[in-house]
Amino acid sequence: MITSAKFSPDEICTDAAATRAHAARHLSLLSPGTILRLHGPLGAGKSEWVRGLAQALGVPGDIPSPTFTLCQPLLGGQLPLEHWDLYRLENARDWDSLGWPDCLITSGLVAVEWPERYPGEWPKNTLDLTLTPQPDGSRILSWR
Ligand SMILES: Nc1ncnc2c1ncn2[C@@H]1O[C@H](COP(=O)(O)OP(=O)(O)OP(=O)(O)O)[C@@H](O)[C@H]1O
Ligand SMILES: [Mg+2]
């Protein structure tokens, strides 16, 4: 794994705009080919974070989420971005037919929600971001 020690310490994001801004602030630290595993419970703000990343990349128009599509390509920005949501995958799903893990090899960025669903190996250039909802409704974002 790439060490993420160069990234900022835990940050408190008090609303969705702050979550998007966190993504935008870290874009310049993400080299092309980076895989981002996004951890956190339902509703933690993972998709919101990817939306912020897409906006910072300059992806034009609406930024749809991959909830029913597994993978949402977000193109037209300075780097191609793919947004995966593995939540609905069954254990028995044939990962080969989805093109995993080869589809994680990218010239752009790949963001994956519910990465725990994938039982296989991840590329070396994988980073982990965890979003933890707090009792007051804010989220703590940590690079681990
Ligand atoms: N820092 C924050 N503080 C408060 N609300 C937030 C914050 N970040 C995101 N939200 C809001 O939380 C809600 C859920 O966000 P989002 O859909 O991104 O969660 P998710 O982690 O992708 O969930 P799922 O696992 O269901 O896909 C949205 O209404 C979003 O705007
Ligand atoms: Mg989501």
Image (spheres, helix red, strand yellow):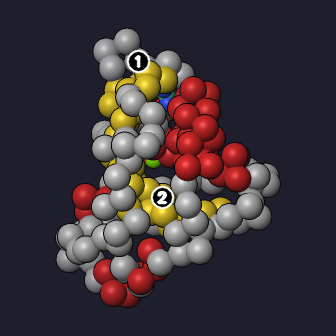
Query: Is any atom of residue 139 visible in this view?
Result: yes
Query: Is any atom of residue 37 visible in this view?
Result: no
Three-letter code for the amino acid on which mark 1 is drawn: Gly
Establish if 116 lies above or below 53. below
For the residue carrying disc 1, how many other residues have a C-alpha within 10 Å: few (<14), some (14-19), or many (20+)? few
In this view, the mark in front (2 or 1): 2
Residue 34 % position (x, y): 48, 63
Q: Is residue 37 left or right of residue 69?
A: left
What residue is disc 2 on? 111
Three-letter code for the amino acid on which mark 2 is drawn: Ala
First along the sequence among labels 2 and 1: 2
Establish if 28 lies above or below 81. above
- Does mark 1 have its CB less than 8 Å from ligand 1? yes
Residue 96 % position (x, y): 33, 87
Mark sitting on residue 137? 1
Residue at left 50%, top 18%? 14
Nearer the observer, 30 or 63: 30
Mark 2 touching mark 1, by CB under 8 A?
no
